[in-house]
Image (cartoon, helix red, strand yellow):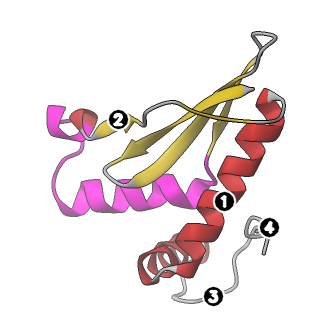
Amino acid sequence: MTSYRVLAWREIPTQIEATDATGAVVKRPMPRWFMQEVSRITMREGLAGTDDYLDAFAWSEPAEREGTADEVAAAVSAELCARFGRTAEGQRIARTARTVRTGAPGAPASEPEPEVAS
């Protein structure tokens, strides 16, 4: 079994950390648009460089699933991308990220969006 946890800022996931039975540890950042949303909110709320910003990061409780550390980190990341992509908030995060990358609201992303399992 592989143990994993998710680092999130408020409710926005930013990193997956997975440790398998062999002791291998994988730290996988979420796609860039997640941190872009964190930055957008941070700037809007004037939290940049403050303790409140840092205090908003928290690790989830550890959970377990089958697979290597790399497989689990990849699967959890894909599931979180899918979950955020299906919600209104997630779609707004994605639109914001496209605007940041391209300078045009709703413009096609300059890099491919992460593939999401159905």
- Which quadrant does the C terminus fall into? bottom right
Q: Which of marks 4 and 3 is nearer the N terminus?
A: 3
How far separated are the C-alphas under marks 2 and 4? 26 Å
- Which residue position holds label 3? 107
Q: Is residue 15 left or right of residue 82?
A: left
- Sequence-wise, which precedes: disc 2 or disc 4? 2
Amino acid at dot 3: Ala
Q: Is mark 3 on a helix, strand or loop?
A: loop
Q: Is residue 24 left or right of residue 45?
A: right
Badge 4 crowding class, 10 Å Cα cut-off, few under 14, some 14 to 19, many 20 or more, is: few
First-in-chain label (2 vs 3): 2
Q: Are marks 2 and 4 in contact (CB under 8 Å)?
A: no
Quick one: 25 or 105, which is closer to the camera?
A: 25
Identify the amino acid type marked 2.
Answer: Ala
Q: Mark number for residue 1?
A: none
Q: Residue 115 carries which label?
A: 4
Q: Does the CB distance between marks 1 and 3 fall below 8 Å? A: no
Is residue 74 shown in magenta?
no
Q: Which of the labelled discs sits on residue 79, or is there none?
A: 1
* Mark 3 burial class by Cα count in 10 Å: few <14, some 14-19, many 20+: some
Label 2: which secondary element = strand
Marks 4 and 1, the one that precedes in the sequence: 1
Q: Distance between the residues labelled 4 and 3?
A: 18 Å
Up-down: is 35 above or below 96?
above
Marks 2 and 3 sit apart, C-alpha to C-alpha, by: 32 Å
Q: Is mark 4 on a helix, strand or loop?
A: loop
Q: Distance between the residues labelled 4 and 1?
A: 10 Å
- In the figure, residue 83 lies in which quadrant? bottom right
- Tell me which corner region of the image, top left, top right, bottom left or bottom right, holds residue 24: top right
Q: Which amino acid does label 4 sit on?
A: Glu
Query: Count the marks: how many?
Result: 4
Q: Give the range drawn in magenta.
A: 30-53
